[in-house]
Every structure is written in C-alpha cells, then in structure tokens.
Amino acid sequence: MNTWLSRATHERLVRELAVLTGGPVPDEVAAEFEVPADKDWRESRIARIQELLRDAVVGETPPDDGIAEPGMVLTVRHGSEDETETFLLGVRDGSDSEGITIYSPESPLGRALIGARAGEQRSYTTPRGKELTVTLEGAVPYGPA
C-alpha cells in the first residue's frame, strides 16, 4: 500500500534515517535529531522509516474531487459540536514541519473518513473504546503555503 508523504515530511525522514544509520551528515542535520541509546527503539524506528520511504508517494496532489483521502486537508465537525477542525490526512513524522495538524490515515479517525464526501457522517471507535461520530465538511488537496 502506498503512503502519501508531503515533500517536507519525506525530506525530514530521509535526514532522520541518515542520522540513525550513522551515515555521513552535516553537523546541523545531526543536531536536528536525538539518537537514543536504546538499540531496539533505534532499529524499530529505522525499519519504520524504511517502510514509509519504500512505499512513499511524495507530494503528489490528489484529485480535487472533495473525497477524503491521504494528501487532502479535511474539515470535520465532531458529533453535534458547532466548531470544526481542519487537518491534513497524511503521515505524522513527529515534527511540526507542515504547520498543520496531521492525522494518519491508519488512525481510527483517518480510517473512518477515507472515501467520505462532504456532508457524510461516519462513526469510529477511539483506542479507549468510545464510539464517536464525525461529519466531513470539506476536503481539498494539500498545498504548503
């Protein structure tokens, strides 16, 4: 399965992988990442980054068809709340490099919204077992400012 990544996220993951694997990197790149002493964590993180990069679709703009999918900025309304929330549906890499909240398509909310159109209400279960509803208000392709 392909994974949608913004260009900034892809570049950050490539830099992090170079640091974690001990590759030659400039000092300013090395300083950007903390390399933990925990060998198991480091190996797990390397494997996850390699998996993401192997299946990456980088920065491709999804069709502007209003359908929720990775690479789209979604505006949703939770339950009967008046306020909306806007976020990018994409891979979270642990940074704030996109300047927008990011939800993974693999998260319960992300899975619930995939394929939704404006006005559709979907239900999902949180990791704590709570059943919630969300209505998709709109979906537009992501474009960094």
Image (spheres, rainbow, N blue to C red):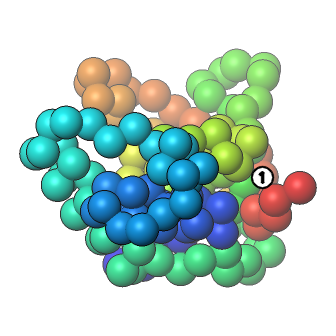
Residue 127 x, y percent position in the rendering: 29, 29
Q: Residue at x 10, y 45 (%)?
A: 40
Q: Viewer-proximal residue, 25 or 111?
A: 25
Q: Viewer-proximal residue, 5 or 135?
A: 5
Q: Viewer-proximal residue, 120 or 48?
A: 48
- Can residue 141 be seen here? The reply is yes
Residue lying furthest left: 40
- Identify the residue position indicated by label 1 in the image: 138
Residue 100 x, y percent position in the rendering: 72, 41
| Quadrant position of residue 139 | bottom right
Answer few, some or many: residues within 10 Å of disc 1's Cα (few below 14, many 20 plus, some between 14 and 19): many
Q: Residue at x 15, y 37 (%)?
A: 38
Q: Quadrant of the N terminus?
A: bottom left
Q: Which element type, helix, strand or loop, lies under badge 1?
A: strand
Residue type at mark 1 is Gly
Q: Is residue 132 left or right of residue 126?
A: right
Q: Is residue 51 left or right of residue 53?
A: left
Residue 51 x, y percent position in the rendering: 30, 70
Q: Is residue 135 left or right of residue 61?
A: left
Q: Residue at x 78, y 20 (%)?
A: 82
Q: Is residue 23 left or right of residue 41?
A: right
Q: State whether residue 131 is above or below residue 59.
A: above
Q: Quadrant of the C terminus?
A: bottom right
- Can residue 103 be seen here? The reply is no
